[in-house]
Amino acid sequence: MGDSPLIQREIDVLTSIVEDYIAKAQPVGSRTVSKVGPAKLSPASIRNTMTDLAEKGYLEQPHTSAGRIPTSKAFRLYLDSVMRLRPLPPAMQEMMAASLGQAGMEIDDILRRASRVLSSASGQVCMVLAPRHDLARWRQIDFVLLRPGLVMAILVLHGGLVQKRMVAVGEDIASDDLVHFGNYLNHHFKDMTVEEVRARIVAEMGAAQQALSDLTGQAMRLALDAFSTAEAPEMYVDGTFNMLSQPEFADITSMREVLKALEDRTRLLEVLDKTMSEYRTVVVLGEESQLSDLAGCGMVSTPYGGQGAAMGAVSVIGPLRMDYAEVVPLVNYTAKLITAMLEKRY
């Protein structure tokens, strides 16, 4: 397969095939392209162009059909070079905002409802990744002495997140000491991410342990013990039933593969982490996800969270041929709504 750039005739024919396949989910033949594609091309020229595109890896031919279907490589070129996003209609924006506005005050209520709203609007499977605690910003920490030698650490983060951990301490630690520890930590680490706090504590304790005061050292050790490991974020999934209406997943084997992939939360988190680290909308096509069970799917993800710091991510998974020009704005708007609600309520 060659990797030379496509000429305009090839791009025009490929665009016609991709858009017809998105609309109909059926293999596209040269006769269809001659009706909807470039008017100046003869049927013979279209057939030759389709053969060239197949040799370059942009089209493939199902065994039972004379038509061709676009590959993930074709969709990548279409998304990057041809597709234009369609603005979300005001009525759709109002409906989504009103529906999400009915969520309760708790963050899990907001995210669970957001997943349901986006799944309904897109007709696909939706995932909303709850904020990763290690990327959330520190608001306040308090320590509660439960009994001599045992403390509960309560860390409140921006976005309404709360972490609670039990920590063993020396039996000589009193409640007044814990108040001093909390005041020190809140003064020095407020508005830093938990990840940044952990890294700074480790660095300072390693570089200047002897120079730290007794208060400082104990406060840092207590914070490090309390939040040394990150909790796995919750993931809210809705609309799995939408896959049943997609012709690509009509057979039980294909459906089983997709459901298996949706259950592999660890691998899905890896894909969503990329979205959060790049802090932009990411479209992953087919094999790009490195999840073999999603080879026939596309995934649109974008982060939510304010001030340039991702808290979590919103994602839609559907067949490779899903209408990205519509889905991308839906995903982006959902993330915008979540961000606004979290900033307003927390």
Image (cartoon, helix red, strand yellow):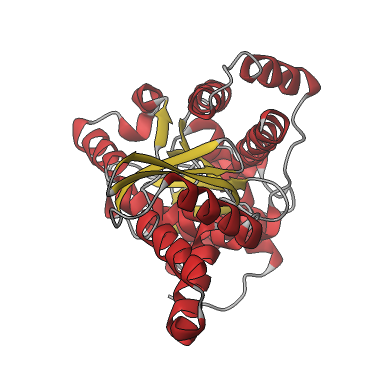
Query: Which of the pair 262/230 is nearer the observer?
Result: 230
52 left or right, relative to 92: left
Query: Which of the pair 324/301 is nearer the observer?
Result: 301
Q: Quadrant of the N terminus?
A: bottom left
Residue 250: percent from the left, percent from the top? 29, 28
325 left or right, relative to 54: right
Residue 282: percent from the left, percent from the top? 57, 54
At 63% from the left and 15% from the top, the residue drawn is: 99
89 left or right, relative to 139: right
- Against 273, residue 204 (above or below) is below
At 66% from the left and 20% from the top, the residue drawn is: 96
Query: Which of the pair 340/204 is nearer the observer?
Result: 204
142 left or right, relative to 91: left
Residue 139: percent from the left, percent from the top? 61, 47
At 64% from the left and 33% from the top, the residue drawn is: 338
Residue 271 occupies which quadrant of the picture? bottom left
Residue 200: percent from the left, percent from the top? 53, 72
Q: State how many labels appear.
A: 0
At 55% from the left and 25% from the top, the residue drawn is: 110
- Against 151, residue 278 (above or below) is below
View extreme (right): residue: 90
Is residue 144 something that shows in the picture? yes
- Against 28, residue 170 (above or below) is below
Q: Quadrant of the C terminus?
A: top right
Query: Which of the pair 72/18 is nearer the observer?
Result: 72
Is residue 295 something that shows in the picture? no
